[in-house]
Image: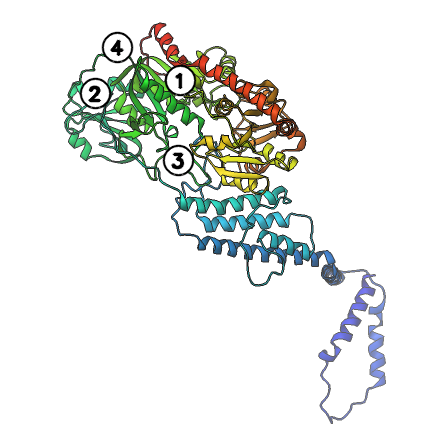
Amino acid sequence: MARRGASVLIALAFGLFASQAFVSPAKGAPEHEVDARVLGATFAGLAPLALEQPANAYDSVVAMLQSWLVGGIALVLIYGAAFVAALANPLTKRRTEVKAEVDAMKRDKTAAIAGASSDLPATPINPDNHGLLYSLHNSSNANVHHTACAGLRQLAEHLADQAALAVAQMAPASSAELESIRAELNGQRPNAGAARGPVLPAVLPLHVDGELRARLCVAMATREDQRIFAEQKVPKIQEPQPLREDEWRPRCGGMVDRWHVLRDHDAFPGEDLGKVPVSQLAQAKAFCEKKGLAGLVLFGGVAYLRAQQSVEVLCNAASPQKGAELLLRPDPLLHRPEKATARLRVAVLATQDEFDETSLFDVGMVSSTGNGRRYAAQALLRSIAQSEDFELTAVLVYDWKNETGHWALPSEGPQHVTLNIRGGQPVSAWRGSMGQLLGACAGDLAVDVAVSIQSRRTCLELMLRSIRAKKYVAMGHDYNLPFGPWGMEVEPEMLALHRVLIQDSRMTMFCTSQHLVDFVHRFSQGRVKTRLCYCADYGYFDSEDLPLANEPRYVTLISPSPAKGLAILLRLALMLPDVEFLCVSTGWTKTLHEVQLRAHPNVKVVPGSDDLDTVYQQTAVLLMPSLWQESFGLVAVEAQLRGLCVVSTGSYGLKEANFLEELQVTPVTLVHDSRTREMLRGLTLAEAEERLDPGRPRKEGQDHIHFAHTLIATEEEAKGFAEKIRFLMANAAERARLGLLARARAREHVRARRGGFAESLKELLAEGSIETAPVHE
């Protein structure tokens, strides 16, 4: 077979290349005669080669060449057929068309958003403060916040990419449908001509759903953020008022007037005379004063003593060192004897979140109002300052947020400030970082009772280490605790330290509801001492005789946000189109939430203010569909004191704040997990408390956050609220009767609890004091 194949190949080769292998004789050359005898002899000699013979090396080479030639021809035929099929495939043509449409929409959208942002006033935006929405915080939680963004134009391009991606992932659409989507995103009708409308619609289209809705909400909220950021107002800062004679102050001296702290500074690094743990800072300061040492450095939980004796030399040698705190001794030391007093001395440790002047206004926020703990803290300070039994000896403001901005924390401190108090006189305070307050106060500030407004780990640590007291009180306003499933801390070492601090034998936790008391007792296994202390115990509700609503019209929700039941309200607005809703935006509310609310014609959105009476006067029913762990519900009591019905979730502290059980909704099978910032469906808060892993980590990424902040509850999830609202709005007489009943019970609550805080402090001190012991490292 090899020989036959070879013969065929030779014949083909001869036929293909014969014209090139032989040169034809020149034109006009004489023709030669072929000798028949020579031709016959030649064929006779070649005849044996035509016979079948065994294959040899020559045949193997020819076979190899043959396989190459045949294989190459086959591959060319296969690829050719595939190419022709691809060109003729209608699906490929459709994909190419869709890709071209989406790319065009991306380019137009990016250019248009960038152009729209360029039309707004050019305002410098701090990348540290401009968070892409929605790392969203809980405004009381600083750890949770702020994914940094390079600038609005980069953000616009990112959002355009996301919107285009969402469109591309939709079911295949015709060219006309794509044009319609594109026009809708651009806020104009198809083929509207050269005149372009706004890049994004003025109001969120209600029929947009799914991921496209979430992306569109984020894009619209970002546009609103830029406008708000350009208009935000800087709080007015008061000049510090003179200190009272009986008010604590850091001790006065020569070059510096107190133990002074230079934040993020060191001097003569490595030249240590000795070192002690920061829990022994008071002893270290006393040693410096006794031996005439100029100061020491705090770094990494350790106090390093410096050998220099001149404060001026140590101060002049100071150089920036991130994380270090340089403490400078008063020089020379002047002793100021404490004034004897019959009243109980109280020191209060607050944070920047408790005062209007120091509260941050982040991009994404629409108001800084509505922080219940802030109002409660100021009511507590007002109560102590006005009491005849107590002396407000010192107010310390631990500030870890204001690194930049209108009131940046100074590098040299603590800083003497004056802060406004709602319903009372301004108070003097000392504001600083942990190192500044610790350096100024440790060993110098001694009182009968020290009170921390928050029960977070860093606040308790600072209070125990900087203030010498007979008793310590941690105010419990939330469930951010080192036990149970709701705490924000997840690192085992920090959780262990937090437990040590809150379980200190001198510490008592004043809980704002009986539910919180029971929760702490259960999950700490009785190791934390607690007392019930409603906000009414220290005069939060300063008046019982509040006016009744004279124009009841709206179902009102204050602080619309995922935790406060935004998803429920969005569904109710669809289920009850004849009911008018009023939403009051506060520090909980983001532009992302307002964008969705304004899409409903029966929802009115107003900014929060201190004048809540204007809101309550227009309210028929107060709605509180909270989906997170409410420790109480101050707004519920405020509304009921004005004769308003409150329809609320019937769980956690809200069960105690809503005095009419018949207006509580249970079960509510929707939960906002404050740690992971996701929405959990199909279980109640009580079930989540049992099932959630206390050690679960925070979730990475933004998709679950965007889902939680743009979710609309199902009709089944909102059914209980809809039934009660429908009944109350249709029966004015019954609504008025229930409102008066709620008013009577709210008044009884306020009267029964009045003065409870002062009595609790006296009872604590009557139990006897325990000598101060060092805090565990």
Other-residue count near label 1 (Cα within 10 Å), few / some / many at <14 / 14–19 / ≥20: many
Residue 374 locus on image (x, y percent): 41, 27
Q: Is residue 17 visible?
A: yes
- What percent of the width, then of the height, locates residue 14? 77, 74
- Give how far across and how far down residue 479 sits, in percent: 49, 22
**SS state under label 3:** loop
What residue is disc 4 on? Answer: 342
Pointer 3 residue: 360
| Residue 538 marker | 1
Image quadrant in which the C terminus is located: top left
- In the rendered image, which quarter contains the N terminus? bottom right
Crowding near pointer 2: few (<14 within 10 Å), some, many (20+)? few
**Kind of residue sitting beneath label 3:** Leu
Camera-side residue: 295 or 41? Answer: 295
Which colour scheme appears in the figure?
rainbow
Res 603 quadrant in image: top right
